[in-house]
Image: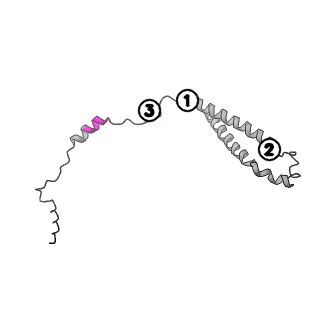
Amino acid sequence: MTTILTVGHISVCLFLIIIVLLQHGKGADAGAAFGGGGSSQSLFGSEGPVPLLNKITTFSAIIFMLTSVTLAYFSSTSSTGSVMSSMPQTVNVEEKAKSTAEKVIPMPTAASDDAAPAPEAPKAKE
């Protein structure tokens, strides 16, 4: 059921995008005032396809919202807990501190022969 609803939701979403892109902007009818579009829109009447596209947009937006709410409802009822419950368990901070404290890293001593000699300081000019 959820798969069918998801496919329908995506198809309604794409259809809604196409319908919105087909509509004219608010300033698109300015040319018709000077005699530019009277006879070319005779198929849809004097107002053109605007009322039809508005109804289709409203209907598809309602369907989109209904599928969104339905998918959200199915998602909330089918979940068994938190998303974090599927994450691997982490080590306790105290246990990690104990394990790193047990590991002793040997540090070179100053008396070691392997140590590089310290660079000499430059002599001050008098």
Q: Is residue 115 above or below residue 102?
A: below
Relative to 51, is 103 on the left or the right?
A: left
| Nearer to the camera, 70 or 1 | 70
Q: Quick one: label 3 or label 1, which is nearer the N terminus?
A: 1
The residue that appears at 71% across and 48% down in the rendered structure is 21
Q: Tell me the distance, in whole angstroms, between the alpha carbons under discs 2 and 3.
A: 51 Å
The residue that appears at 16% across and 66% down in the rendered structure is 121
Q: Which residue is mark 1?
A: 76
Asked if residue 91 lies in the magenta stretch, the reply is yes
Magenta residue span: 80-97
Q: Quick one: label 1 or label 2, which is nearer the N terminus?
A: 2
- Nearer the viewer's eye, disc 1 or disc 2? 2
Q: Tell me the distance, in whole angstroms, between the alpha carbons under discs 1 and 2.
A: 39 Å
| Nearer to the camera, 126 or 17 | 126
Element class at badge 1: helix
Q: Does residue 8 appear anywhere in the picture? A: yes
Q: Does residue 1 appear anywhere in the picture? A: no
Element class at badge 2: helix
